[in-house]
Amino acid sequence: MAQLSSNLLYTAFVLYLVSIVFFSGAIKAKSADGTKIAPSRSAKIGILITIIGFIAQVGYFITRWIAAGHAPVSNLFEFTTFFGMALVGAFIVIYFIYQTPLLGLFTLPIAVLIIAYASMFPREISPLIPALQSDWLHIHVTTAALGQAVLSISFAAALIYLVKVIDQTKSDKKTFWLEVIMYTLISTLGFIIVSTAFSMANYESTFNYIDKNNAEDQIEFAMPAIVGPNEGELQSEGSFQPLIEMPAIINAKKLNTLIWSLGSGLLLYGLLRLIFRKRVSAMLQPLVKNISADLVDEISYRSVLIGFPIFTLGALIFAMIWAQIAWTRFWGWDPKEVWALITFLFYAAFLHLRLSKGWHGERSAWLAVIGFAIMMFNLIAVNLVIAGLHSYAGS
Amino acid sequence: MKKRRTVIRTVILLVLGGAVAYTLYANLTKDNIQKVEIGKMAPDFVLVDREGEQQRLSDYRGEGVFLNFWATWCKPCEREFPYMETQYQRYKDQGVHVLAVNVSESDVAVDKFIERHNLTFPVVIDKDGQVQTAYGINPLPITFLVNPDGEVIKSHTGELTEDKIQEYMELIKP
Amino acid sequence: MNEVKCECGHVNPHGTILCESCGRILDDKEKDKQLLDMRYEGSARRSQTYNKTIIDKIWNFFSSVKVGVWLIVLTLGASALGTILPQEMYIPPVMPASEYYEDQYGWVGKLYYELGLHNMYGSWWYLILIASIGVSLVICSLDRVVPLYRALKTQRVSRHEGYLKRQRLFGISDTADADMDLEKIKQKLKAKRYNIREENGNLLAEKGRFSRWGPYVNHVGLIIFLVGGMLRFVPGMYVDQILWVREGETKVIPGTDGQYYLTNNDFILEIYDKETDDEVFDAAIDRVGTVVKNYQTNATLYQKKGNTIPGEKPELEKIKDKEIRVNEPLKIDGFALYQVDYKRDELNKMLFRLENKQTKESYGNITIDLFDPQTEFDLGNGYYVEVMSYFPDFEFDGEGDPTTKSRIPNNPAFVFNMVTPENPDGEVSFVAIQQTIEPLGDNEYKMAFNGVETKDVSALTVRKDLTLWIISLGGAIFMIGVIQGAYWNHRRLWIRKMDGQIWTAGHTNKNWHGLKRELESVFDETGLPAPKDQLSEDKKE
């Protein structure tokens, strides 16, 4: 069952990749005359493959649930995979409302990146610790993830909007920050490529080091150590000697992974710039020229409107109910709780600015980007860097 | 019309401001909330002292009670005990009693302690913690001053000097 | 002077931009715009029209959405600051917070502590931020919901032409048979559940007006939620206590005024086992090591019968047995007891053997209850052991005297006097774990260690929270309001006959795409075109 489950996930992953190709075909096939055309054949195939992929991933989810005996949302791999699945699900729904293949071209790569990122974490089925043994596990986590997924669609739409409207003929703050977004996405890809490469090469180096409590400890690096741990002594032969040693308070392993990701991202990004001789967003701009800016702005806003109540219900209300049962209090200022509150407050501010202050279009799009950044921070940094009750085994 | 609006606004703002002020006040003072309120009746209890006598707080009505919670491992408690003993000798004929409640220690530990310090006032052991719970005891030592009417007139957390003890005993003299 | 009379005869409050009744533009600035600003229906938000007394100034400050958004952003930023380092309540109790932060995080930690960020969410300024959001919620809502209600209630079917042509969806068309077209449109609108009002042959179709109240409903929910949070500070509303109870022990439950008692019959800690648990977990167990499966206290709950005072032996009546686990608290009378912590294998009894050091011969065993040791043990035949002193948590104090750190037997030590036929006055021996001191010279006998008995201690949080139902009510109302405002929208269509032409205008508070599609299907197969989106036409040019 567990084997079947991972095969289904793999299938879904490949199908999503294939559908991206069809969605990009749908853009090229489009006539230049305006906003309302029936979806092309290519788009229809794209959405069909996406749906099949989604069904395969739902299959993964169900079979893994059966195999584990609990909803597969209990560790970082499972949660992130589910988030990716919810993102695809949300995209399918939005696609049928607005009929925009272009949204697929932006959403699916993000979903693929997220699923690939998820699989960089330990993938085995883990037993539930006592605090997680509750039906609220799947009620709370799935609703929260679904809410975040719908909110992420607003990011994808906002990205289309920004690529479309930002003037690429000059170089200013806006083009710079748009490139930062592109670079961040590329760095995620870099992280995936680098981790996969080193794990396929079975790279491992072990260090003895002194931790921040002055105790001796051992740590294994899965990537060559550019930065090494405090007073680290390399134990494995033939491994790379660290260039710089970190003080004990900094987690050298995580910093090293970050350096590799950003470095490989920089390399990829640099290559793209060298080959195409223009900004990545400028490269993408022709793809979006046929879409109505108003429509993507509305998709972005609509996604926030749909996602905000789901997110509030899942990440705050259900979370509070469960926290009252498992942790004796509905609110305890745990970092993850606080970041859910921050996300909530941010989108509340987004809605107020839009409704009452008239922040439409570009401003609203930048806000959607920040909102997504907050959610990703909550997913990645809060789990891996800021320790708390929610920390999953994902070192 | 305009006047009415000002009145409504004033009332709403006062209500909101009051609620906020109360919350702030309550939040900032929540740490010093004592289980036993000053001026209220001291919760009654009955425990057996080391001589085998029942010591019931309400039996001392009409006399002052210097009620001290302590433990053998608590250094400040140990330091204030000799002072309590000498002041007890001075005031016991003037209607001021000392009642020392030990917090759930073993008989042997308490007896050795009494022996070592030659204590003559009644010492009781709150074995199952009921009295500590009723008084909300946390840090030691803590002393409650119970007046002849059975009301707590003061509580003091931490070590006492001999002068302070004398001053307190004066307070509860009938 | 305070009121504005519109040409249509309706009297509007001062500051009104669009006549509540006919929609005529009352504010000259608005006339230059191509599209109307339809927020709050152009009604007079009271805050913006009065600015006289200090009361009005405070009111206007909190009534501003801009201020509200700033408060949200400030709270958001502050909340983020508090997650940089763990809050005081989450640090291990190894040392005081004043030392811990500097010790663990260096100067950053020191700064964090000194700025008070280690206990930020309980600080006065964070509370003021949250409270200001609450005040802003009340005032913003009051200031908007009243005029909006008035405007929507007073709106007339026939709207002024200036109002119609400044709507985002607008169209003018000529038609031969206006009445027949209108009839068709009316039927279709009805099928789409529009409410239709007619006046002088003009038409107003409207649906989903209730979604306009969504924001105010959710604000009411939030206010109730905050009130619930505030009530927590009222004495008696909230109990947060911890109860440590050993196996076999019965203790009064703190916070219940001595009414309830709890016995810990057994504490159970289970871990996942590769042999007995599902083999799909094997890989994870191999990687992580041990994974806990269950923390459980088998408890019996008692209620006190009659009125005893503390210290008296209470008469207890059994209420129920309950297996308290994480996620499965014991609930009684508004209280809940949660499994939160434990201490395994606390020393409970120590066993010794009186032994002749040379012959190794034993002259009897004694068992010492570490919580209340017996002091005299008669082993018969003239052998006798006396416990002269007992230190449950032994250490040497500054002067080198033995002393105890607490009453918990973490490191028990004893002074024994061993009376034997050879030594009728006894030999004194100081015995601690892995340590024996014979202060009065070499002894013939010793107390040989003969084993221990241990017990587990379970920690339960005792919680009462009478604010929960208010918090839940607030949360529920908030969700209803958010859903009401987000998943429905207020759509209106005006149709007005003007000199043989038909003017159509449409408005929605959100989801224009949805309205456009709906109107297209409504106008389809009638002789009239659907109103056009003036905004997207702009863009194309």
Image: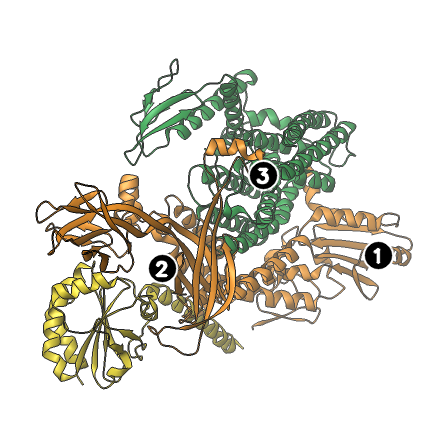
Chain colours: A green, B yellow, C orange
Dot 3 amino acid type: Phe
Could you confirm whether marks 3 and 2 are on the same chain? no
Circle 3 Cα neighbour tier, 10 Å, few/some/many (<14 / 14–19 / ≥20): many
**Residue at numbered disc 1:** C191
Residue drawn at 79 percent across, 51 percent down: C172
Distance, label 3 to label 2, CA atoms, is 36 Å
Q: Is residue A124 visible?
A: yes
Residue A127 falls in which quadrant of the image? Answer: top right
The image shows residue A45, relative to residue A243, as above or below, that is: below
The C terminus of chain C sits in image quarter: top right
Could you confirm whether marks 1 and 2 are on the same chain? yes
In this orientation, which residue lies closer to the viewer: A279 or C157?
Answer: A279
Q: Is residue C45 visible?
A: no
Q: Earlier in the sequence, mark 1 or mark 2?
A: 2
Residue B37 falls in which quadrant of the image? Answer: bottom left
Q: Which mark is residue C124?
A: 2
The image shows residue A78, relative to residue C495, as above or below, that is: above
The image shows residue C313, relative to residue A225, as above or below, that is: below
Report the number of numbered marks: 3
